[in-house]
Image (cartoon, helix red, strand yellow):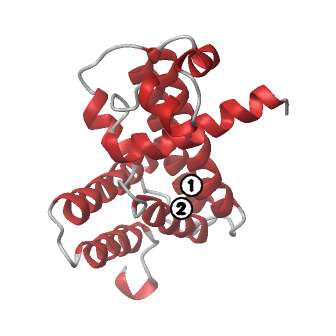
């Protein structure tokens, strides 16, 4: 990695931290230059525009999410243990200062068409696809019933995490995490094959 690439990566890491707390639009070239002790022109040279910076922030968020949530989960056994790991890692991700970047950015960018929103949609869809893929693997491994709709499972799991963010960060409900885990356990329990006694 060249010196310029190292500088750009350091800028993006700080930009991501700021965006998680103050929003993507709050991370201006001037604010970031001040944070990094760089000139505005020096920082601008790395991105070329505020829009390009916003796209790069979303992409950096995706990179960090993959490393923090997905990569560790892929080390777990295929099937339900991996689904559990994805959920557990996602919970930890959402407890960072500012909460889940993607939840906050979705609310911020939902009515703002353009490349930053497009990048956020791609990252979100990729994650939902990974949840559905994990559910399909759990079906193949026999951990989930063959009748389980993997896309519906991903939809419901994503909904559980959105509720977690709303109840824990916005409403400050002290039992939000307990309720989140209860909802997840009910979802996975309902997805398992019926035991012989229950048939």
Q: Which residue is mark 1?
A: 134
The residue at 58%/22% (across/down) is 43
What distance separates the C-alpha of mark 2 from that of mark 1?
9 Å
In the image, what residue occupies the spot 56% across and 32% down?
59
Q: Earlier in the sequence, mark 2 or mark 1?
A: 2
Residue extending farthest to the right is 1
Indicate whether 41 appears above or below 183: above
User: In the rendered image of this protein, does residue 22 appear above or below residue 115?
Assistant: below
Point out residue 64 in the picture as x, y percentages from the top left corner: 59, 47
Q: Quadrant of residue 190?
A: bottom left
Q: Residues within 10 Å of mark 2 (few under 14, many from 20)?
A: many
Disc 1: CA contacts within 10 A as few (<14), some (14-19) or many (>=20): many
Give the residue at mark 2: 86
Cβ–Cβ under 8 Å for marks 2 and 1: yes
* Element at label 1: helix
Q: Nearer the viewer, mark 2 or mark 1?
A: 2
* Quadrant of the frame with the C terminus: bottom left
The N terminus sits in image quarter: top right
**Front-lying residue, 195 or 173:** 173
Q: Nearer the viewer, residue 180 or 50?
A: 50
Residue 187 appears anywhere in the view: yes
């Amino acid at each position: 990695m060249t010196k310029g690439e190292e500088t750009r990566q350091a800028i993006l890491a700080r930009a991501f931290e700021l965006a998680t707390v103050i929003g993507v639009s709050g991370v201006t070239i001037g604010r970031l230059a001040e944070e990094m002790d760089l000139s505005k022109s020096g920082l601008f040279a790395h991105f070329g525009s505020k829009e390009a910076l916003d796209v790069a922030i979303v992409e950096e968020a995706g990179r960090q999410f993959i490393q923090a949530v997905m990569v560790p989960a892929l080390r777990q056994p295929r099937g339900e243990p991996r689904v559990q790991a994805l959920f557990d890692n996602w919970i930890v991700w959402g407890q960072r200062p500012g909460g889940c970047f993607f939840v906050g950015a979705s609310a911020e960018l939902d009515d703002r068409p353009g490349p930053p929103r497009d990048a956020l949609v791609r990252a979100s869809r990729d994650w939902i696809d990974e949840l559905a893929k994990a559910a399909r693997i759990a079906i193949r491994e026999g951990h989930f019933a063959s009748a389980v709709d993997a896309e519906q499972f991903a939809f419901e799991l994503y909904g559980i995490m959105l509720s977690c963010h709303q109840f824990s960060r916005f409403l400050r409900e002290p039992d939000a995490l307990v309720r989140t885990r209860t909802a997840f356990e009910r979802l996975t329990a309902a997805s398992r094959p019926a035991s012989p006694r229950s048939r």
